[in-house]
Amino acid sequence: MEKVESGKFVTVNYKGTLESGEVFDSSEDGQPMEVKVGSGQVIQGFENALMGMELNEEKSFTLEPDEAYGSRDENQLHTFSRQEVPPEMNPQVGDVIGLQTPDGQQIPAKIAETDEEKVVVDLNHPLAGEKLNFEIQVVDISDTPTQMSADCSSGGCDCSSGCC
């Protein structure tokens, strides 16, 4: 029977929960996720768990923060004075905004604190510091992609050009 190995396109049904039982992501209400194993499309611990699985095999596993999104880093909290915030913006705690890096990349930042003088943004991944529990099932293993990847849909190519 065919097994998951590096270079294969693997389609997976999955449910991810936090230690509290809260579901943070799932394919239950959408389509399964397809990943090219070994390409870094998913967190390393998830990819490691896929390795060697067979078609229709199910698995449950827990990832420690260092296998997922890392530990929270309080150095990733940045404070901006209100004068640096565009006047049309009204940031509220919990909002996610896009910040632009000096090289032009957009990165998400969550508003952690705000008052009349300052806005504090958190650049940690929302799941940093969390243990992640997964239930997965391999539903397809292929040598070629069977779904259009998110990169292709946002990049405007049709996958035949090899961008996937």
Image (cartoon, grey):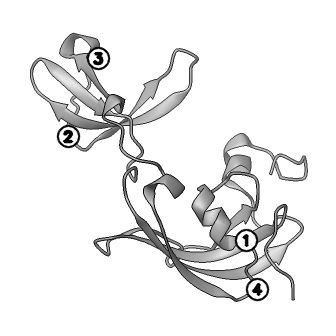
- Residue located 51% across and 79% down the image: 28
In the rendering, which numbered label is found on residue 51? Answer: 1
Query: x, y percentage for residue 80?
Result: 26, 18
Name the side, left or right, on which 1 lies relative to 68: right
Q: Distance between the residues labelled 1 and 3?
A: 47 Å
Label 3 crowd (10 A; few <14 / some 14-19 / many >=20): few
Q: Which of marks 2 and 3 is nearer the N terminus?
A: 3
Q: Say if residue 146 shows up in the picture.
A: no
Q: How far apart are marks 1 and 2 (CA)?
A: 40 Å
Disc 2 element: loop
Name the residue beneath numbered marker 4. Answer: 55
- Residue located 42% across and 45% down the image: 125
Query: x, y percentage for residue 151?
Result: 70, 47
Q: Which of marks 3 and 4 is nearer the N terminus?
A: 4
Foreground: 146 or 69?
Answer: 69
Name the residue beneath numbered marker 3. Answer: 86
Residue mark closest to the camera, 4 vs 2: 4
Three-letter code, disc 2:
Val
Three-letter code, disc 4:
Leu
Name the residue beneath numbered marker 2. Answer: 93
Label 2 crowd (10 A; few <14 / some 14-19 / many >=20): some
Asked which quadrant contains residue 55, the reply is bottom right
